[in-house]
Image (cartoon, rainbow, N blue to C red):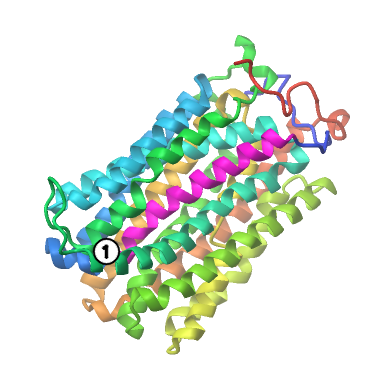
Amino acid sequence: MVEPASHRILDAGPERVSIEAWWMLAVLLLLYTLSFVDRIVISMLVDPIKATLGLSDVQMGLIIGPAFGVAYCIFGYVFGLAADRTSRRKVIFGGVTLWSLSAGLSGLAGSFAGLLLFRVGVGAGEAALTPAAYSMLTDRFPRRRLTTAMAIYQMGAKLGAALAFAIGGVSIAFAATIQHSHWPIVGNMEPWQIALALTGLPGVLLALLIFTFREPLRGASTNAAADRPPLIPFLRSEARALVPMAIGFASISITMYSLTSWAPTYMSRQFGWHPAQYGPALSVISLVGAGSMIVKGMFVDWLYGRGMRDAHLRFFTWLLAATIPVGAVAFFLTDPWWFLIAYGVMQVVALQFVVFMGATLQLFVPPTLRGQVTGLFLGVFTFLGLGAGPTFTAFLTDYVFQDEAKLGMSLATTTCLTIPLAWISLRYALTPVRAVLARQNGPENLRAEPENNVGRVAQP
């Protein structure tokens, strides 16, 4: 067991949060929202990209999934390590710039290999954001407010999805009106190429906002060499908690990314809807999901404050249990509006899970390993989610059901396999997680949180 004496999690603490801390959270939320816009908008362009480049569903699945997921997995640890050792603001700035340029320039791709390469750049850049963001939030917000802060940050996933479907639909429509324009250097561009440029390139300027607040002071133990536990021994010592958590969150990640990637195409193939029709509906679902994150975060903080030390994980298993029957019937509904209701229930109730994973990790991972462990977790579930989810669904469509019209059967199969597996794995993880928290929360430390570092900032 690797556990520095100074790394005991202490609950209660100052409830006041500085204006600068809230501004930092707002900037991080904006950048996280932007990352999901660039991540998701390509899913609205599957059919026109296929038509232009002559690609199959499997090739599009590889572009949407593994190209992004493998890069995110590899660079998640790299940037997580950088966040533990260097300026987290600079790490985020570099990542945002990289993914924005890659997303915006994806429109220049003229082949499968070219588009695949640009998606690798998007995945690598986005891997820099959340490990550093979680680390800064943990150092700026007291424990009793941490889940709420992370829930607000995590709203970016839903807001990004809403904007991707809304702005993406508008961008596609606008791009269609100017597709015959002759652009300098690149010449004529298809609407999907213009849409990718319109949604991606603004991030290069927005990245500068990361320098409008100061770097938070890291946890006290980060200054002592003796409190720098090696990563591998820590992972081994807490494997009984970390392994089932990784399996569970990776499983639900497969569901989330598969649905997010293929739902627009499913609406088009199954119900004949086009982006201007399904875009607003999916945007509303995402906005409702974003608002629900705050409510869920506040409720978990309330449970935690009342003594439920595994509240973050336990509450999420309750949500998964409620979602299993909905996922079993959603893709057998023949009315598009009833499908949207079922799809909305899954998205709002259970498919945004990162805040529960992140908050649980922050409670028992040493400060000097937070970026690395968070990066590893994000990398694993993004690799398996984006890498396996869209591709597995496409494989079922192309090679098992052998009919593009049976995309719904592929999505139903994916959902019915992964949500129950996630529930079983995370329920199994509850006991070892409670044991870890009990070891770190000595009885004498359950009611006081050190005030020396929470909310402080590093000297410029």
State the extent of the magenta-drawn residues as a range.
Answer: 18-45
Q: Which residue is drawn at 18% across and 65% down?
A: 50
Q: Residue at x 51, y 35 (%)?
A: 209
Residue holding disc 1? 175
- Tell me, yes or no, whether the highlighted magenta stretch contains residue 346: no
Marks counted in the figure total 1
Which residue is at 41% across, 59% downward? 257
Residue nearer the viewer, 137 or 4: 137
Q: Choose top left, top right, bottom left or bottom right for residue 278.
A: bottom left
On screen, residue 421 above or below 341: above
* Foreground pick, 426 / 390: 390
Give the percent coordinates (x, y) of residue 352: 55, 57
Tell me: 338 left or right of 317: left
Q: Taking 48 as reference, is 152 left or right? A: right
Q: In this view, does 220 lie above or below 361?
A: above
Identify the residue shown where x is 31% and y is 59%.
42
Residue 36 among those drawn in magenta:
yes
Q: Is residue 24 above or below residue 333?
A: above
- Find residue 78 and report its horizontal and vertical position in percent: 40, 29
